[in-house]
Image (cartoon, helix red, strand yellow):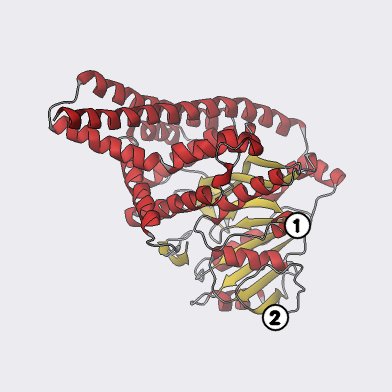
Amino acid sequence: MKSIFIFLLVLSMINLVYMFVLNSMYILTSILSFGALRKYARRLKSVNIEYLLTSAGAPPITVIVPSYNEESTCVESIRSLLNLQYPEYEVMVVNDGSKDQTLQRLIDAYELEPAYRTPLSSIKTQEIQTVYRSMKFTNLWVVDKDNGGKADALNAGINMCQTPLFCAIDADSLLEQDALLRVVRPYLEESQTVAVGGIIRIANGCEISGGVVHQVRLPKTWLARFQALEYLRSFLSGRMGWSVLGGTLIISGAFGLFKRSLIVEIGGYETNTVGEDMELIVRLHRHCLEKKQPYEIAFIPDPVAWTECPEDMHILANQRDRWQRGLMEAIWKHRVMFFNPRYGRIGLLAYPYYFFLEMLGPAIELTGYISIIITALLGMLSGSFLMAFFLVAFVYGSIVSIFAIALEELTFRRYLKMSDLLTLILASLLESLGYRQLLTLWRARGMWRKLTGQAQNWGKMQRKGFGAISSSQA
């Protein structure tokens, strides 16, 4: 019995240390984010973006939109993209073998006609059937191809892209009208920039019409509210801080701007993973560092893409399951970087962080929770340890979330109603009482599925869409 108690105690202590280190890292990145966000906000006030674009010469951009079974939302989503404020850009929709009326709806709405377009690269993809061009909007192209998944669709779009930069977004993402104006800025200020990510925000609960978010509000359900808080913490506290450290390893697939020539050079998106967005960024770091090629990968906090988050437990569980598998695939594929001084701060800092605290995190947390429960049932749980666990897991965790809310309020302040702000604060106090544990369970399930070779594809999930219901490959 004594050996069992010691074993359970060790597991519990590992979990306690893990949570302390994880939350401390978030506090550190939050502090770095605070300074960077204040500096960025001041620069925005002193610089006219449109003047900068005019004087520096705005590089043309192609917005690549991989689409699968988007018949209920495709027309409105594309209409919003055609209204973006940018001097010269194209919208390229890649219909990835949709089984519904996605293609026909686009043909009817935008008067698409078959047209020839010369591919500028030859990344291997599934066969392209037809290329269309709109007779109403000459900057709208649609590529119809056999189904190969999101990464394959993006690669097809890259092959057909004829601009130096391309913006990869999800079919259900809504870009703010000046999003391209803002996200391109690092390319104008630093010629070595190869990739830029923008912030993703939750659209659930917002007032949306014509593909534009007119009023920002919190979602109606607590499940979505927890995710809204989670996104603030992840982007404003996490990714902004890691950008300051030069350790950005993730640019969300929902909104990223890339230097096309370099993406072609490294072979495009990896099609044998469910985490192609992270894998691409890790591979970019590795390629540039191995070639000793100067580069910058940036995160910008104000060009916003809005996306719908799941409000169904089953869909959210599948999403986090996939995210965990994608993380594991990216980390394992590039394990040569692990604590390797050849890769600088990426190999010595960013990679170990994602390896220990993100990839192994679910297993550490789950075993810790189980050990604490068993210890309590056996009557061996000490009051001092329980208090320490409560302070680290719940109080410290809530402080991290409140810090993220403060960053939002002190900088961009999208949630204008006091009721939304108070609800976010309440969510920060409640998320550790069930929601965090569910995320841990779902991510642990993703780990198990990856290790046992189960569910290696994206699968299908239902999305409501912005005012509609659509079936999407995600």
Q: Is there any visible trace of residue 319 in the rendered image?
A: yes
- In the displayed structure, 38 sits above or below 277; it is above
Viewer can see residue 309:
no
Q: Which element type, helix, strand or loop, lies under badge 1?
A: helix
The N terminus - image quarter:
top left
Q: Amino acid at mark 2?
A: Glu
Q: Position of residue 267 (x, y in %)?
A: 67, 60
Name which quarter of the figure residue 43 lies in: top right
Residue 466 location, x and y as percent?
48, 58
Quick one: which residue is furthest to the top in this view? Answer: 384
Query: What x and y, as percent, mark residue 375?
Result: 18, 31
Which residue sits at x=50%, y=40%? 354
Q: Quadrant of residue 289?
A: top right
x, y percent for residue 295: 73, 42
User: In terms of sequence position, does the residue under pointer 2 or pointer 1 come before the other?
Assistant: 2
Which residue corresponds to mark 1? 261
What residue lies at 53% left-to-right and 67% top-to-bottom?
149
Determine which residue is flagged by label 2: 113
Left or right of 120? Residue 19 is left
Q: Secondary structure at mark 2?
A: strand
Residue type, label 1? Ser
Q: Nearer the viewer, residue 222 or 128?
A: 128
Instruction: Decide: few, some or many residues near mark 1? Use Cα within 10 Å; few <14, some 14-19, many ≥20.
Output: some
In the picture, residue 62 is in which quadrant?
bottom right
Left or right: 298, with 237 as reference point: right
